[in-house]
Every structure is written in structure tokens, then in C-alpha cells.
Image (cartoon, rainbow, N blue to C red):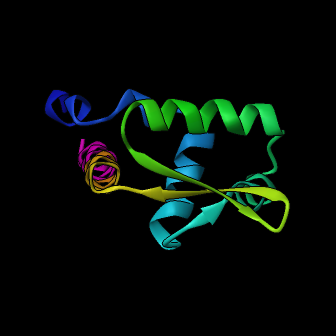
Amino acid sequence: MKEYLEHIIKGFESRFRLGIMSVLMVEDKVDFNTLKESLQLTDGNLASHLRALEEAAYLRVEKQFVGRKPNTSYFANTEGWDAFKNHLDALERLILESKNI
């Protein structure tokens, strides 16, 4: 069981970061407001979780203006995809192993 725990990534322990990455696994690109509404987070709370994922190099940020309004979009990069998939695989193995105990 200990080997599964080694593959669980601390950066994904927060339910909000799990939610962000889950949305990014399904959607190619998601803007800030869509994430905020989907996950029912405040601007500041969402921004801090996105910053942590960006600092961990799990997502890419694209900023642009739509008309006169700023628009920020987020993408899961290859490292993010791989890390999240490995994290979910480790959780699944841990659950399956626990059922067999």
C-alpha cells in the first residue's frame, strides 16, 4: 500500500484543485469565470488554487482581451495531464487494494 501513497500528489489533495484539474481534463480550454461558476469559488480562492497549479507546472495560462475586457483561460499541459492521471491511478489502486484487505 505504501507504494501507492508515493504516487499521490500533495498538490491535488485539495478538492478544489481536483475539481480544477478534472474540468481541464474534459475541456481543452476553460476561462476563469467558467471555472469559478462550475466550482462555486470566490475569485480569490480560485486564483490561489490556479496559481498553485501553475507554479507546479500543471497548467498553462493564456491572457487576452475580448473587446475591452480581460479574459484568462487555462489549459492542462502535458505535465499536468500525466501527473493528474498518475494521481488518479494511484488513488484507484489504493481503493482497490483496500477493498481486498
List the single residue furthest toward the left: 3
**Residue 81 vs residue 68: left or right?**
left
Question: What residue is at 77 percent from the left and 52 percent from the top?
Answer: 36
Q: Quadrant of residue 45?
A: top right
Q: Quadrant of the C terminus?
A: top left
Q: Quadrant of residue 12?
A: top left
User: Magenta segment range?
Assistant: 90-101
Total labels: the figure holds 0
**Residue 11 vs residue 20: left or right?**
left
State the image coordinates of residue 14 (x, y, percent, origin top left). 56, 34
When the figure is inspected, residue 8 is found, relative to residue 82, above or below; the finding is above
Q: Quadrant of the N terminus?
A: top left
Query: Residue 15 or 5: which is nearer the viewer?
Result: 15
State the image coordinates of residue 53 (x, y, percent, origin top left). 48, 37
Type of secondary structure dominating the magenta stretch: helix
Query: Residue 41 or 14: which is nearer the viewer?
Result: 41
Question: What residue is at 61 percent from the left and 34 percent from the top?
Answer: 49
When the figure is inspected, residue 72 is found, relative to residue 43, above or below; the finding is below
List the single residue furthest toward the front: 68
**Residue 47 vs residue 86: left or right?**
right
Q: Quadrant of residue 43?
A: top right
State the image coordinates of residue 80 (x, y, percent, origin top left). 35, 49
Query: Residue 83 or 51: which is nearer the viewer?
Result: 51
Query: Residue 72 or 21: which is nearer the viewer?
Result: 72
